[in-house]
Amino acid sequence: MTAASATLPASQRAAPPLWRQTLAPVARALLALFGWRVEGTLPAAPRFVLVLAPHTSNWDGWAMVVAGFAFATPLAWLGKRELFVGPAGWALRRLGGIPLDRDAPADAVRDATRALSGPGHLALAIPPEGTRKPAPHWKLGFHVIARHARVPIVLGFADYRRRVVGVGPTLYPTPNLAADMATIRAFYEPITARYPAQV
């Protein structure tokens, strides 16, 4: 993967305020059309890591992309590079996708940290499970990236029981990983995934 500063579309770095304001009500209306609503408030911080959990379906990612527009904050997100081919790859990049080489996770952490340390606004969404399959242990790259970039972690969710997509608390990562993860896990405990058996 090339340097994140080169792979991020300009629209993900600093979108015009009028553009954000125009699309926000459209995105909220689209979610409402499918019986969903948006909940929560984003932090004032210009750059942050957005945890996307629980992640058991491709619909989770799309729901958060639309929610990002509803919050007037387009999201950047990491996806396996095999998805970014042909016209679909172009569309995914326009939606904030950044190709990820799964064989070089250290490079992904480095490039994501660079992007979050740069200028402009950036919300980098990361599913901690790293897969839609059952994952008893979360990957901790989101915590490492946030600590290195010195940005907060925002807890994003899609609750299929309440049909709500949104954001919860914002926390700053500390060297006490166990304590941070206990706080994060406690927040997600009542959230219902699309496929609860895969959590």
Image: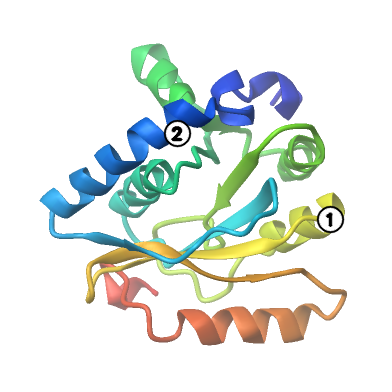
The residue to which callout 1 is attached is 150
Closer-to-camera residue (24/165)? 24
Q: How crowded is the residue under tag 2: few (<14 C-alpha within 10 Å), some, or many (20+)?
A: some
Closer-to-camera residue (34/186)? 34
Give the side of residue 66 with respect to residue 3, left or right: left
Residue 168 drawn at (x, y percent): 50, 71
Identify which residue is drawn at 77% across, 37% down: 107
Q: Quadrant of the N terminus?
A: top right
Residue 86 drawn at (x, y percent): 39, 12
- Up the image or down, 156 lies above or below 21; here it is below
- Up the image or down, 169 lies above or below 186; here it is above
Which element carries disc 1, helix, strand or loop?
A: loop
Q: Quadrant of residue 40?
A: bottom left
Give the tally of numbered discs: 2
Identify which residue is drawn at 70% across, 53% down: 45
Which element carries disc 2, helix, strand or loop?
A: helix
Closer-to-camera residue (120/51)? 120
- Say which amino acid is labelled 2: Arg
The span from disc 2 to disc 1 (Cα, nearest Å) is 26 Å
Give the side of residue 33 with respect to residue 85, left or right: left
Q: Quadrant of residue 14?
A: top right
- Up the image or down, 167 lies above or below 80; here it is below
Of the two numbered discs 2 and 1 in the rendering, the one whose residue sits closer to the viewer? 2
Identify which residue is drawn at 66% across, 38% down: 121
Give the side of residue 171 with respect to residue 71, left or right: right
Numbered badge on residue 20: 2
- Say which amino acid is labelled 1: Arg
Earlier along the polypeptide chain: callout 2 or callout 1? 2
Residue 58 drawn at (x, y percent): 32, 49
